Image (spheres, rainbow, N blue to C red):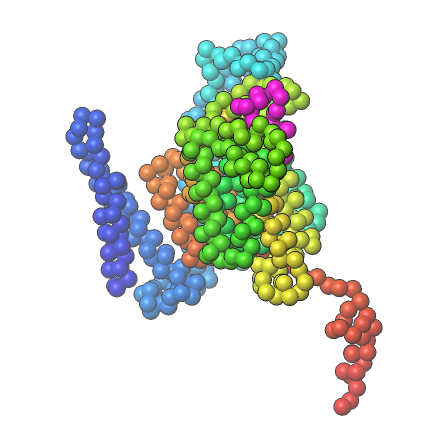
């Protein structure tokens, strides 16, 4: 009874907290509309979720059954048959709910349109239309739109709804027939076999790449842009994972390097034009400038650790943002310092002010080109998608190779114990400088791609909240885990976008999922496994032939 009272108090508190947002609505004529059903459904949902929350705390070991007042619930689930049936019902409900909410009417309209088109259009006309569509993609001019545009088929919602429903039906059937544990062990072994290096993992990666390749031709422009943003955030998360996850250096101003790369591409294009400097030329330049900024930041903070390092890097990020809002930057102080030691004529670019656009930002940034060919807007968005996907894959491979290299092991030693790392002869200064430089370099690459994708940037795109979100990607995925960072970026970037249909509740769902992760999975989605290295010829420090001698000595009578 005490648990029911607590759940009622929590639900009433949430209803009162969200009352002005969910219940009261001002109509266009100025009258108030009272939506009591929203408060009722919210209170009922919180009431049920409070039981789930207390049960999870008991399972986690944070609370006891008596404290949670859930003795009756755990006594009910002690029988395996009841537990399997309830799990199967939950799986069926969660898997069939998206199927009921899928856009079937839009899919039916699209199929009816294409059926009429295939039945009434000659083959020659279809071939001509296909040629016009392909030519519109590879043309610099925007393709002409039809007078009656065809309804797009909702491929992604239908596909994932059907796949989730089939998975739920299979899982529910096994739960109802008492084969849940065998099915769960089979899935766990399959996941572990895919995670291990070998043919299965390579085939899985190849299958994922083949699935991602045709997406720009299936999805609309909005979803392609969202996927491109996810790839950029994967690059940013993996770059910050070098600094935070592997080297153990807490950085809160990582977005500054992101801004350096973006403004490098924008300023060079605004100053010299896209004819002289293009995307492919400025991509390594943006990464180089960001790496230089990372080295300049790391030099004064080599002796700082923990919170002090975080505060300094946070200040560096704010300095970069305020500088961008100032509108211009000049190297005149550097020229004055150099003139104190020489009377030589300095180049003019040292005293020329660079226009950064100020709060209004810089617009008109060109899209990337391919071998000098300018695409249409739709084709450029598709090209940006493929560039972002390729760069994300290259980043994953490069970070994995760096992790297993000598410098990667130096970063891990620096993270575990800085004093012991230095005592073992590892160059602590070089390890920190390389971590900052390489992490900032990938942020610069991501900034150049971001500027080319959006064609407009301003300082509001590089605030502290962006740094916090990038750090959340790394922490949510798992510090030091490459696959975890990829999953964390997909969750934090794709989940809010695809929850827009629940526009009133999406941030509530997003925040609740983050709280659940912090409580029940603080180490992240995927925890990196410690590698065991076996040195050939070494056996308890007594040479390669010590094993047989030790076993023979153990068998001798004492």
Pick the residue in front: 353 or 493: 353
Residue depicted at x 54% and y 57%: 303
Q: Does residue 95 show up?
A: no
Residue 140 in the image: above or below residue 507? above
Q: Residue furthest bottom?
A: 558
Residue depicted at x 60% and y 53%: 432
Q: Residue furthest right?
A: 545
Q: Residue furthest left?
A: 31
Q: Where's residue 150, x and y in %? A: 48, 18
Q: Does residue 44 show up?
A: yes
Kindly indicate the quadrant of the structure image that contains residue 546.
bottom right
Residue 230 horizontal side relative to residue 358, left or right? right
**5 falls in the magenta region:** no
Assign the N terminus to one quadrant of the image: bottom left
Residue depicted at x 49% and y 13%: 145
Residue depicted at x 34% and y 53%: 49
Pick the residue in front: 557 or 347: 347
Q: Where's residue 96, x and y in %? A: 44, 41
Q: Name the main secondary structure of what is drawn in magenta.
A: helix
Q: Where's residue 231, x and y in %? A: 55, 37
Q: Where's residue 90, x and y in %? A: 42, 50
Assign the C terminus to one quadrant of the image: bottom right
**267 falls in the magenta region:** yes
Residue 157 in the image: above or below residue 244? above
Kindly indicate the quadrant of the structure image that contains residue 101.
top left
Magenta residues, as a range? Answer: 266-285
């Amino acid at each position: 009874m005490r648990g029911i009272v607590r759940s009622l108090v929590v639900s009433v508190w949430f209803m009162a907290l969200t009352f002005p947002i969910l219940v009261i609505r001002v109509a266009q004529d100025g009258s108030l509309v009272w939506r009591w059903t929203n408060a009722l459904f919210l209170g009922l949902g919180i009431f049920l979720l409070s039981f789930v929350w207390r049960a999870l705390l008991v399972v986690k070991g944070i609370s006891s059954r008596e404290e949670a007042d859930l003795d009756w619930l755990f006594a009910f689930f002690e029988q395996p048959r009841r537990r399997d049936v309830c799990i199967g019902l939950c799986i069926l409900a969660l898997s069939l709910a998206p199927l009921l909410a899928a856009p079937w009417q839009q899919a039916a309209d699209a199929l009816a349109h294409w059926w009429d088109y295939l039945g009434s259009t000659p083959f020659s006309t279809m071939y001509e239309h296909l040629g016009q569509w392909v030519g519109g993609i590879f043309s610099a001019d925007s393709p002409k739109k039809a007078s009656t545009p065809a309804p797009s088929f909702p491929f992604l919602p239908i596909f994932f709804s059907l796949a989730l429903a089939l998975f739920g039906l299979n899982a529910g059937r096994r739960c109802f027939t008492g084969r849940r544990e065998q099915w769960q062990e089979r899935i766990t072994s399959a996941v572990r076999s895919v995670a291990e290096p070998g043919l299965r993992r390579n085939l899985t990666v190849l299958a994922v790449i083949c699935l991602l390749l045709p997406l720009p031709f299936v999805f609309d422009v909005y979803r392609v842009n969202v996927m491109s943003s996810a790839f950029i955030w994967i690059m940013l998360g993996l770059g910050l994972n070098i600094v935070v996850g592997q080297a153990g250096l807490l950085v809160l101003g990582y977005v500054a390097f992101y801004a350096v790369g973006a403004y490098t591409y924008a300023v060079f294009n605004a100053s010299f034009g896209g004819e002289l400097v293009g995307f492919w030329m400025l991509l390594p330049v943006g990464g180089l400038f960001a790496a230089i900024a990372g080295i300049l930041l790391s030099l004064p903070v080599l002796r700082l650790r923990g919170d002090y390092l975080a505060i300094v890097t946070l200040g560096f990020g704010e300095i970069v943002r305020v500088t961008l809002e100032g509108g211009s930057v000049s190297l005149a102080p550097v020229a004055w310092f150099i003139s104190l030691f020489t009377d030589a004529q300095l180049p003019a670019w040292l005293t020329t002010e660079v226009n950064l656009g100020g709060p209004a930002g810089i617009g008109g940034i060109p899209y990337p080109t391919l071998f000098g060919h300018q695409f249409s807007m739709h084709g450029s968005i598709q090209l940006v998608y493929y560039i972002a996907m390729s760069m994300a894959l290259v980043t994953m491979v490069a970070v994995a190779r760096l992790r297993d290299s000598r410098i990667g092991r130096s970063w891990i030693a620096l993270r575990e114990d800085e004093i012991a790392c230095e005592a073992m002869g590892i160059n602590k200064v070089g390890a920190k400088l390389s971590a900052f430089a390489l992490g900032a370099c990938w942020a610069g690459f991501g900034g150049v791609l971001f500027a080319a994708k959006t064609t407009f940037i301003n300082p509001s795109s590089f605030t502290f909240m962006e740094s916090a979100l990038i750090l959340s990607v790394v922490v949510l995925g798992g510090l030091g885990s490459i696959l975890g960072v990829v999953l964390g970026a997909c969750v934090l970037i794709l989940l809010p976008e695809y929850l827009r249909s629940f526009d009133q509740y999406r941030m509530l769902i997003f925040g609740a999922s983050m709280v659940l992760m912090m409580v029940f999975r603080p180490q992240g989605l995927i925890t990196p496994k410690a590698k065991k290295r076996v040195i050939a010829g070494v056996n308890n420090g007594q040479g390669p032939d010590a094993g047989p001698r030790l076993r023979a000595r153990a068998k001798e009578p004492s």
